[in-house]
Image (tube, grey):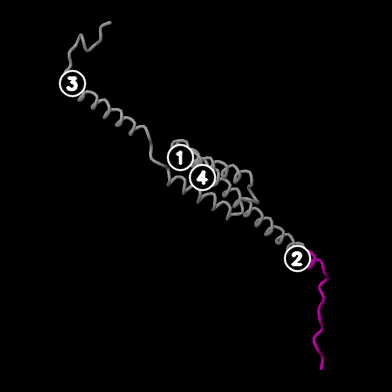
Amino acid sequence: MTRINDVVRIPSHQRAKCWTMVLIGIVALSGCSTSKPPTDTLAKAELSVRDARDAKADELAPMNLKIAGEKLEKAKQAMAAKRYDDARRLAESAQVDAELAEAKSEAEIVRRAADDVQRRVDALQSEAERESRKPLTTVPPNQE
């Protein structure tokens, strides 16, 4: 069996250069394919989840907050496994879900406040109507 080295004579120093170039290329390509850890994205997602909890989303938008929390945990797991693209995608999705939970919570708080104001207005109107139906009485001036 004929080997390539028997057919083409490549000096050993050139073979070393060739292998060096191949290794440099592999290292360069592998450096381009790995992304950096999405620590900023993860921090923003954590902050959004905390803000949603502060806005009472656990009470007023529990499903959205739960989904955001689950995605945040998965993002942390992906980060620990150095699957940075997955971690970034999950953290961004968790942030959006947390912001939705916060918005729903705030909307519910505003709706409840508006209902309370409407009840007070209705009570004042009822009271005003009752007062307007009372007969007018005149008080005679004091006679001395």
Instruction: Name the mark nearer the viewer: 4 or 1.
Output: 1
Indicate which label's residue lies in the foreground, 3 or 2.
3
Looking at marks 2 and 4 on the same chain, the residue that comes earlier in the sequence is marked by 4
Disc 2/disc 4 C-alpha distance (Å) = 49 Å
Residue tagged 2: 128
Span highlighted in magenta in the image: 128-144
Location of residue 59 in the rendering, given as x and y in whole percent from the top left corner? 65, 51
Residue 28 higher or lower than 100, as above or below: above
| Residue at 47% in and 36% down | 86
Q: Which amino acid type is marked by label 4?
A: Gln
Q: Which circle's residue, 3 or 2, is located before the other in the chain? A: 3
Q: CA distance from mark 4 to mark 1?
A: 11 Å
Distance from the alpha carbon under mark 1 to that under mark 2:
60 Å
The residue identified by callout 4 is 95
Report the quarter where the C terminus lies.
bottom right
Q: Position of 24 compared to 101: left or right? A: left
Comes first in the chain, label 3 or label 1: 3
Q: Nearer the viewer, mark 3 or mark 4?
A: 3
Q: Secondary structure at mark 1?
A: helix
